[in-house]
Amino acid sequence: MNNTPLIKTFNPFLLATLSIGITAFLCSPLSNTDSYHLVSFILLLVVSVLATILNLGPVLLASTLSALVWNFFFIPPHLTFHIDKTDDMLVFGMFFIIALVNGVLTTRVRRQEKLIREREERTNSLFQLTRQLSKAAGMEEVISIARAEIKSKFGVEAFFILQDGNNNLPLIKKLNDKIELKSDEYALTEWSFNNQQKSGAFTSISPQLQYTYFPLPGNRINPGVMVIQSNSAIPIHHQTFWDTFIAQISNALEREFLGELAQKARLLNESDRLYKTLFNSISHEFRIPVATIMGAADTLLSSPDPAPIQRALSDEIFTASLRLNRLIENLLNISRLESGHISIRRDWYEINDLINKVTLDLTEELKPFTLTISVPDEMPLVKIDYGLMEQVLYNLLYNASQHAPAASEIELGTKHSNGSLIIWVSDQGAGFPEESLPNVFNKFFRVEGNKAGGLGLGLSIVKGFVEAHNGTITAENCRAGGARFTIIIPSEISQINLQPETP
């Protein structure tokens, strides 16, 4: 098959005949001269040109006609095939052989060139397909690229039916809004998937159906089946190219399947790890206050102790109940954060009221420490969610009380700068190992070797509540020792603070 427009307009054999005839007519003035040998070279040139655009059959016809025409019209005696001179007979024989050989070799070279060009185009097509599929992110993008490339290279519509992850094809009755699979067609789709053989139109399996079903083979899992809607079978000389094309697409789909399975496995492992961590932590942390409550209550019930001892036991029950309540609150808060059910109710508050409320709740925990509070006299009202920020300061101060040595100083400071509320809490404890700083706000994270209890949820909750205010929190080690947490929350100044003071 040739792409030359002239070949599509004329029959190749007719074109070869006309070319030789026109050439002989144009060279007719040389027939009665001693230059008739020149005509043979002209005819050879025409045969060579025809060999570059025609197939072997028309070229052989042109070679034979050129020899006969040169003999009949140009070699003396004219208008006869008889040759008088021996040298003319030799030249004629050589001309005939050279014309044939030249035509055959030129056609063969052209055919090889065409095969090489087609091979390069196919290699480039496979390279482009592989490159695009390697950049694809997700199953949908892989399918979109595959359909577009198949349409571009083979001119057929392709549809994909992928397995559900359990090596079963889902029940799909429609390939798109217009094409619906019948029950026998879907059954054949399952057969091709299970047996890994193509079926349908232009195959030996149910050739009466209108679609062709190609299984998508994989190394570890078979992604599914590709459905082709075509008016003809894939040509034999394109079969290898087609199979390689399908293999590339199948490998890309298998890669996405394996990636999804690996992601699910990671999530399951992480969930299992978190479950075990949470279960172990809860079992340990809940056991202490529950044991305290049970022991104190049992003592109260079984012995008539004096009033001071009963008071002390009641205080222990109350303290253990607070600890148990705090653990439950942390679990509820982390659940709210993960579910996205945190709603911010901002209003204007005095920061001193917030600090006083938190320090009052932590009176017992802060007794062994020197608490230094730094609030500027000109501190304006701030717009925050009081309940969430109360828990933020509570967790930070409680965390400091659990990790700082007794009789040391805990500092709580706040200021308003550049349209932001800034709060910091620092202690004089051991601080964090440098490698642990990036993880201090992670759920269930606890520094190895730390004797302080807890579920490792406090700082994670703090970070979530601060970010709910569109703020940030950072943790760092102080130069003199201890840890420092800094919170920055956007907060404009209220109109009350902007009003001028009356004299």
Image: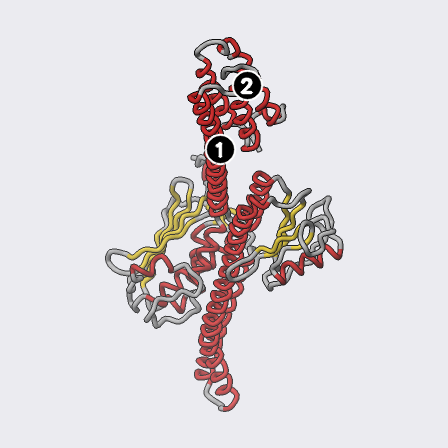
Residue sitting at x 51%, y 65%: 268
Badge 2 marks a residue whose secondary structure is helix
- Residue 20: percent from left, percent from top: 55, 20
Residue 46 seen from this side: yes
x 55%, y 18%: residue:
72
Residue picked out by circle 1: 104
User: For the view shown, which residue lies furthest in the left direction?
Assistant: 480
How many circles with numbers are drawn on the protein? 2
Above or below, comparing residue 109 to residue 455 in the picture: above
Query: Farthest bottom residue?
Result: 303
Q: Which mark is first along the chain, 2 or 1?
A: 2
Q: Which residue is more in the foreground, 242 or 339? A: 242
Is 196 on the left-hand or right-hand side of 187?
left
> x and y percent of residue 462 in the render?
44, 57
- Quarter of the N terminus within the rendering: top right
Colour scheme of this structure image? secondary structure
- Taking the spot 42% from the left edge, 44% from the top edge, the residue there is 420
Mark 1 or mark 2: which is in front? 2
Disc 1/disc 2 C-alpha distance (Å) = 24 Å
Question: Counting other residues with Cα less than 10 Å from the Cα at mark 2, is it few (<14), some (14-19), or many (20 or more)?
Answer: some
> Observer-nearest residue: 38 or 435?
38
The location of residue 255, given as percent across then percent down, is 50, 55
Left or right: where 215 falls relative to 401: right
Specify whether residue 409 is in view.
no
Q: In this figure, which residue is indicated by the disc labeled 2? A: 72
